[in-house]
């Protein structure tokens, strides 16, 4: 078994974000890797479907079964990916879990957006909101490292609808982050109703950074494949 991580919006260097959890998994003999999303890191920026294709390429590289873990926007990516013979289970972490035809913009809360458009087809998170909404549990050193990895993203991804719904064909687990201030727990629980099973943890928006033990515990927990 292997684990493939897919990060959320407005950041780069997915491997850095997931490393604390990857280290715990490695201690249990579980290999992992993190996708590089073209919508955040390529020039020109890719779209939602390019992001899904980047994950598909990693899955194609091996027949080994994979847990595919999507965080926040990453849930859009792993859902649009569709079914793949290497996917053992999808894991959604405080994530969006769309059906076919639903876009990230459809899950708006009515609150002012946390991102700002730059007028060139890209958007980024409002920096003054990063720590209070997304990283309230980061220590200073970790926050500084995270802030250095914020990125502009192709804003087209927020209006692009899912063209596949992988969770309809593949077992899925939804991890509700009960102390998340960015994607509120009530919104998460509504998304989680579509998953095969649900785990709720007392954590904020990036538990794989601050509580890797808990996230790894979910990934290491045996579950039926159907």
Image (cartoon, helix red, strand yellow):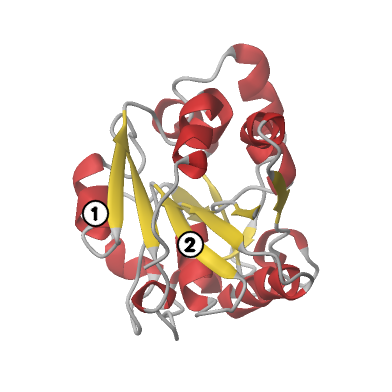
Which residue is at 74% across, 68% downward? Answer: 58
Q: Quadrant for the C terminus, please.
A: bottom left
| Whether residue 111 can be seen here | no
Q: Which residue is mark 2?
A: 89
Q: Which residue is mark 1?
A: 109
Q: Quadrant of residue 67?
A: bottom right
Image position of 9 (left or right of 40): left
Mark 1 vs mark 2, foreground winner is 2
Q: Position of residue 96 (x, y in %)?
A: 37, 60
Q: Position of residue 29 (x, y in %)?
A: 71, 38
Q: Position of residue 224 (x, y in %)?
A: 39, 58
Which residue is at 51% across, 80% downward? Answer: 83
Q: Quadrant of residue 57?
A: bottom right
Estimate the spatial distance between the alpha carbons at disc 1 and disc 2, rounded to whole Å. Answer: 28 Å
Which residue is at 71% across, 27% downward? Answer: 145
Tag 2 or tag 1, which sits nearer the N-term?
A: 2
- Could you say whether the residue bearing mark 1 is in a helix, strand or loop? loop
Q: Quadrant for the N terminus, please.
A: bottom right
Q: Which residue is situated farthest in the top direction here?
A: 140
Q: Nearer the viewer, residue 134 or 171?
A: 171
Residue 10: numbered disc: none
Count of labels shown?
2
**Label 1 crowd bin: few (<14), some (14–19), many (20+), radius 10 Å:** few
Q: Nearer the viewer, residue 88 or 79?
A: 88
- Could you say whether the residue bearing mark 2 is in a helix, strand or loop? strand
Q: Nearer the viewer, residue 180 or 225?
A: 225
> Where 8 sits versus 75, above or below?
above
């Amino acid at each position: 078994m292997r684990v493939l991580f897919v990060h959320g919006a407005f950041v780069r260097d997915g491997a850095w974000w997931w490393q604390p959890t990857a280290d715990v998994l490695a201690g249990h003999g579980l290999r992992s890797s993190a996708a590089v999303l073209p919508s955040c890191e390529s020039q020109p920026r890719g779209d939602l479907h390019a992001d899904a294709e980047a994950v598909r390429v990693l899955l194609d590289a091996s027949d080994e079964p994979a847990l595919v873990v999507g965080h926040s926007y990453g849930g859009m990516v792993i859902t649009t990916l569709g079914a793949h013979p290497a996917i053992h289970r999808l894991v959604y972490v405080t994530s969006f879990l769309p059906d076919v035809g639903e876009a990230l913009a459809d899950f708006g809360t009515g609150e002012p957006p946390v991102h700002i458009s730059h007028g060139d087809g890209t958007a980024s998170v409002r920096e003054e909101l990063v720590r209070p909404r997304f990283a309230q549990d980061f220590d200073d050193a970790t926050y500084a490292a995270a802030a250095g990895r914020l990125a502009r993203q192709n804003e087209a991804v927020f209006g692009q609808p899912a063209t596949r719904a992988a969770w309809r064909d593949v077992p899925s687990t939804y991890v509700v982050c009960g102390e998340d201030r960015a994607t509120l727990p009530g919104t998460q629980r509504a998304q989680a109703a579509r998953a095969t099973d649900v785990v709720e943890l007392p954590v904020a928006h990036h538990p794989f950074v601050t509580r890797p033990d808990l996230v790894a515990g979910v990934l290491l927990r045996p579950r039926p494949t159907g």
